[in-house]
Image (cartoon, rainbow, N blue to C red):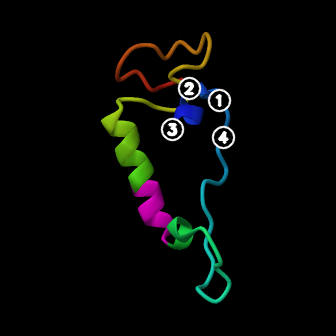
């Protein structure tokens, strides 16, 4: 989440996790359930009242609740 806050709000994050079958998954265990990982990320962002680009220099996103480019 700290990294997302510093990342430009105009940068598209293509992949945070992936999917595979149990047969091929060695580690990490947290990537077994992609949807759970994404829900956890969304929950943590909400808990911290933050979003991608919040701390990006000159992003213009310094007002709480203003998440639009």
The extreme bottom residue here reads 23
- Give the label, 1 or 2, closer to the camera: 2
The mark closer to the camera, 3 or 2, is: 3
> In the rendered structure, are the residues bearing label 1 and label 2 in contact, judged by CB atoms less than 8 Å apart?
yes
- Is residue 46 placed above or below 56 in the rendered structure? below
Mark found first going from the N terminus, 2 or 4:
4
Magenta span main SS: helix
Instruction: Specify the quadrant that holds the C terminus.
Output: top right
Label 4: which residue? Answer: 12
Residue under pointer 3: 1
Q: Earlier in the sequence, mark 1 or mark 3?
A: 3
x, y (%) of residue 38? 46, 56
- Disc 1/disc 2 C-alpha distance (Å): 8 Å
Range of residues picked out in magenta: 33-39
Give left or right: position of 60 versus 14. left
Q: Secondary structure at mark 4?
A: loop
**Residue position for label 1:** 10
Q: Secondary structure at mark 1?
A: loop
Query: Do residues under tags 3 and 4 come within 8 Å of each other at their CB atoms?
Result: no
């Amino acid at each position: 989440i700290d990294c997302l806050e510093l990342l430009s709000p105009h940068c598209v994050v293509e992949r945070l996790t992936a999917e595979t079958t149990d047969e091929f998954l060695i580690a990490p265990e947290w990537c077994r359930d992609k949807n759970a990982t994404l829900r956890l990320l969304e929950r943590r962002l909400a808990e911290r009242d933050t979003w991608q680009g919040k701390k990006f220099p000159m992003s213009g996103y310094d007002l709480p609740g203003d998440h639009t480019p």
